[in-house]
Each structure stands twice: as structure tokens, then as C-alpha cells.
Amino acid sequence: MAKARPHYACTNCGASFPKWTGRCDACGAWNSLVEETVVAIAGRPQPDRARSLSFQTLESAWPPPSRQILGIDEFDRVLGGGLVPGSTVLIGGDPGIGKSTLMLQAAAALARQGVETVYVSGEESIEQIRLRARRLELADAPVLLATASALGEILGGLERPPVPRMVVIDSIQTVFHEQLESAPGTVGQLRAVADELVRWAKRRDAALLLVGHVTKEGQLAGPRVLEHMVDAVLYFEGERGHQFRILRAVKNRFGAANEIGVFEMRQIGLVPVANPSRLFLEGHDGELAGSVVFAGVEGSRPVLIEVQALVGTSTYGTGRRAVVGWDTNRLAMLLAVLEARAGLALGTRDVFLNVAGGLKITEPAADLAVAAALLSSVSGRAIPRDTVVFGEVGLGGELRPVPQTDLRLREAAKLGFERCWRPRLETDAPGVDAFRRVAELAARFEFADGDGHEVGR
């Protein structure tokens, strides 16, 4: 007879403990342990160690698996060229960001190519999905719809011929395993459900797309083992006030990680953006102090982004720091470098930094662009309109080269930029507009407050 034994699992890392504690000993998270019940199945066969493995070499006579091209260029780009049969992709994002819309568009695009496609929803009724399909002009796509939350019911429907080649589960947190007593969305349920679905996808050589919820910190809800089980993890990013959406690959076994796809939210759904640099620079005013064009690289794609800074007088004794689209800790480090190496003291002034378009910058190459925006805002002098900026700033005030310089410069030249402020390289010819230290950049600006007194240098 099956014997139930209670235990406590961490919702952050999935670690299991025999009793409750306030802090998880594995990951250090507080108040993350929840009670679950594991059913031990009597009579389970012991591992057969008499069987042996057959080892193979790295050489293979079989061709690589063919990909299923969706026809949504930005989605195919993030996936590495299309869906790989037998792979599992986990898509996460904030509520209302457009995950279900993108999944329905992907399912319809593949179904129109004659591929058997199934869309299973545990959150919406079939009529709600049909309403969205009519709004997106996808009602004629031969997508098979179903609403279910029980894992056995879902797997039973998928086994009926013809077996689908692509399956969308929206969302994984709503599906529950009938043999587990815990509620849907708990650590044990997510682990068991994902394991069964991934095994089915690999056995049937079908592509599986799982929609996942995120926590208030922006991380995928559930144990980290869920991200290890799947082949690709994609995050859907964007601000609700902007029409742009960013699909970013943080893990991809069949393509490049950190690759991004850019979409624009319209009435007919998510529309791929072929040239995101031009879109991100719409409304850029080259005569505005504190505005800088940063030449960045996201994955394998160069992107030009506007970085805006505003330095104002603080009402209180301590200056405020507000950052959108960049790392707050890196801004604090950069302000300390400007004070120590360039003589620019901003400790008592308010500093506001914004990355236009809703994109989040993570690479250190944005240091020099942020420093230039701050210096421009303090001095009230605009950076030349035809200038792009990129480079890493060290704690000693030195400027360090960043990778893929040629790729950044080609993208800037394609959009009409003629000058570039970047770290000087040993191969640079005389007269190249580059810098060696952040103090040389600061020397280009004159700093004065409203009364004409010098600020910093």
C-alpha cells in the first residue's frame, strides 16, 4: 500500500527538508518552504544493474535534426533558426505582456503550414481563445484547441492519432498530476508535470512550448530544476507603457543564449521589428543635453539605443537615484569613478537614468554612454547628433575595449552616424575620435550650476 510522508520543499530552488525552517539551507531564501506530501509507491522495481550501456563516439552518420520554421522572423531568430523536433521551450513573462498572444500566433503560423498543432489552455475557455484568434485574424488557422488541467487527460488526448507535432501548454502552473495530493503550481507538481511532458515530447519527437508564470522579482515561478529540464528558456520583457516587447533567450541548447527578438504590439497582435535600432531611436533629439546614443550588442545583433540622463538639484541633503533599464549598482560605481577620477561630485544631486524604448541593458559596454549622458546633463551641453558612444569604465577611470567593435560601428554607419566615442585601441590610426581615460571625456564638458559656480572640475 502506498505510504504518504510529509516533507517541505523550497519554492525557490526545489530543495527538500524533513521539517519546516524559516530559511532554506540550500539557497538562503526566507519563508520559501511549503509542505508537500510524497506518495511512496509500494512494489517499485529496483534498478537493474545487470544491464549495460552502449557507448558511442562523437562522430555521427545521422544528419542534424531539421528545424520547423515558424515564419515569425524574430521568434525564429531567438530559437536559433526555428523549433527543433523533440525540444521543450519554456516562455515566461509578466501578466498581460503578450505570452498567450505570441503562442497563439506561433501555433497558427505552424498549423497553416500543414503541421498538426495543439493548443491546450488551463486558464481560458475555448471561446475566449477563439475571441483572441478573431481579433488577431487567425480564426482560419487549423489549430486544435482544448481546455484541461489534469495531466492524464492531456497526455491521453495527445496520444490519440494523429499525434501532434507541436503542442502549446498555457500554462504549466495550472496542470496537476493526479497521483500527487499537492495543489497545482507547487514544487512537486511542477517537477512531476514537467518531467512527464518533456518525456512525451522526446518520445514523440514533437516540439513543446510551455508558458510559465513569473514571481514579483521577475523570475520564473517554481524550482530551478524546471529550467534545467527544458531545452530553452525565453523571457518576454517590456514595459506596459511602451508598444515594444523583447523576447530574450537566457538558455538555448540549440542556439545562442542572450539572443533577442523585438516585437511591436499592435491591434492585430505582435508584429516582428526588422530594424529595432531605427525604432528605438524614434524621437531622439540630438540637441538635447543628457541624451546619448549607445551602440550595444544583444546576442548576435547590434542595437542602437538612446540613453537619457537628468541631473537635478536635490531638495534634501542626499541625492535620489532612479534608474530604468540599467543596473542601479553599476550607476553607483560609475558615479564614484566620476567623482574620484574626474572630479565630478554628484553625491548631493538627484540623478535619473532611463533607457528609452523599454529595453534592459546588461552589458558593461554601456558604461561610457552613461558617463557621457551624465556629463552632458550636468554641463547642459548636448553631445553631437552624429555620435555614438560605447565602452567599459574601470575603477581606475580607465576605458577598456569591448568585443564586437566592428559590428557596432557598421550598425552605426548604416544609420548615418559619423563619429564614435569609444576606448582607444592600439590599432587605431592617428586622429580617431576615441578616449583613454574617463577624465579625458570629462574635460570636453564645462560644469557650472545655475549661479555660474563651478561644479566638480
Image (cartoon, grey):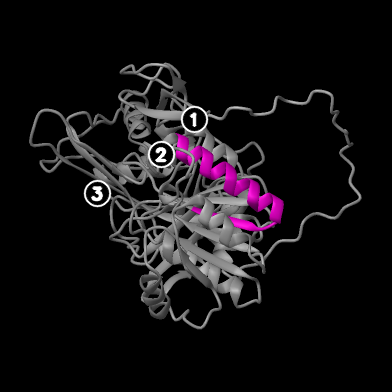
Q: Are marks 3 and 1 in contact (CB under 8 Å)?
A: no
Q: Quadrant of residue 159?
A: bottom right
Please tell me how many numbered marks the rendered image carries: 3
Nearer the observer: mark 2 or 1; the answer is 1
Identify the residue under disc 3.
Answer: 380
> Left or right: where does residue 66 sit relative to residue 187?
right
Q: CA distance from mark 3 to mark 1?
A: 68 Å
Callout 2 crowding tier (Cα within 10 Å): few <14, some 14–19, many ≥20: some
Q: Nearer the viewer, residue 150 or 70?
A: 150
Residue flagged by tag 3: what amino acid is it?
Answer: Gly
Q: Are marks 3 and 2 in contact (CB under 8 Å)?
A: no
Q: Nearer the viewer, residue 261 or 112?
A: 112
Q: Which mark is residue 95?
A: none
Identify the residue under disc 1.
Answer: 39
> Left or right: where does residue 247 sit relative to residue 239?
right
**In this rendering, is residue 299 above or below 42?**
below
Instruction: Name the residue at 58% across, 58% down.
Output: 156
Residue 85 part of the magenta segment: no
Which region shows up in magenta?
Answer: 188-210
Residue 190 part of the magenta segment: yes
Secondary structure of the residue carrying numbered label 3: loop
